[in-house]
Image (cartoon, grey):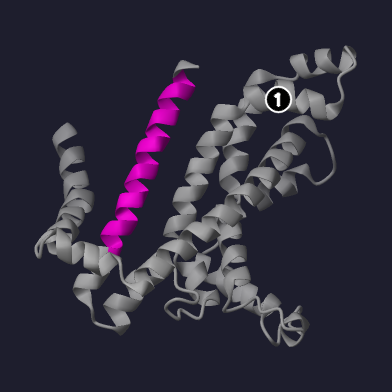
Amino acid sequence: MRVVALGYLFMLLLVPIMVILWRTFERGIASFIEAISTPAAISALNLSLLIVAIVVPINVAFGVVTALALVRGRFPGRGLMQALVDLPFAVSPIVVGVSLILLWGVNGWFGALDSWGFQVIFGLPGMVLATIFVTLPFVVREVEPVLHEIGDEQEQAAATLGASKWQTFWRITLPAIRWGLTYGVVLTVARALGEFGAVIMVSSGFPGVSQTLTLLVHSRYIDDHNTYGAYCAATLLMGIALVTLLLMTLLDRKRSNA
């Protein structure tokens, strides 16, 4: 069983990665650096990081509030909210992109914003909305079980002693959920960096304007027929993902020992 499992992982994961790395560095480090330091590549990296910087705080705030409502609250429609949180896991990112176009496009429900000079679709706002949707569940699903585990006895004791809700959250709840919250943030970052399906639907894809790293890989490989440049961009994206994965592993170990 171990041989079968390792062989499966080797063929499915390691072989494609090794091929990409070999094709990337077969011309040397200098060529790789040159390929990832073009204006289009730098702009794509900056845009990807900007989207992450916007999406993560929004999903952290929404995720913590939603997790608290689902665990501590008892209200009509709680089951529906649980289902809505998991909706991004079930819906194809392409469908997400199409729905955003129907809502925020020129002829959509909120298309009047475009005539007022606020462009959502084919701009940064649309890409942020798409990324927020696909990364929405991660913080909620990492914080929720931690809240179940710690219970609410300490929060009730703090309230009995006169602490306000904000003081209780800041001094009791937040320290207790810090590892779950951090783990959810790491998952959100990883998912946001690698998102392609929803983003490509709401992005113009123009280099230097609305092209993320994933769209850069697609553009170089499909549109420009620049196979080597696509491999280099993919390696850069893979390196960032590897750093995120290592961070996630370290956090998981610390959470287990906490």
Q: Does the magenta stretch include residue 239?
A: yes
Who is closer to the viewer here, 18 or 117?
Answer: 117
Residue 82 x/y as whole percent: 68, 45
- Position in image of residue 168 (x %, y %): 79, 23
Task: Name the residue tied to disc 1.
Answer: 173
Residue at (48%, 23%) from the top-left corner?
Answer: 255
| Circle 1 Cα neighbour tier, 10 Å, few/some/many (<14 / 14–19 / ≥20) | some
Q: What stretch is highlighted in magenta?
A: 233-256
**Residue 30, image x, y percentages:** 16, 62
Residue 183 or 150: which is nearer the viewer? 183
Image quarter in which the N terminus is found: top left
Residue at figure coordinates x 58%, y 49% from the top left: 56
Kindly identify the amino acid type of the residue bearing the numbered disc 1.
Answer: Thr
Is residue 241 inside the magenta stretch?
yes
Q: In this view, does 12 lie above or below 178?
A: below
Above or below 32: residue 222: below
Q: In this view, does 37 lie above or below 169?
A: below
Q: What element carries label 1?
A: helix
- Dominant SS of magenta comes to helix
Total count of labels: 1
- Toward the viewer: 130 or 39? 39
Res. 96 image quadrant? bottom right
Quadrant of the rendered image containing residue 133: bottom right
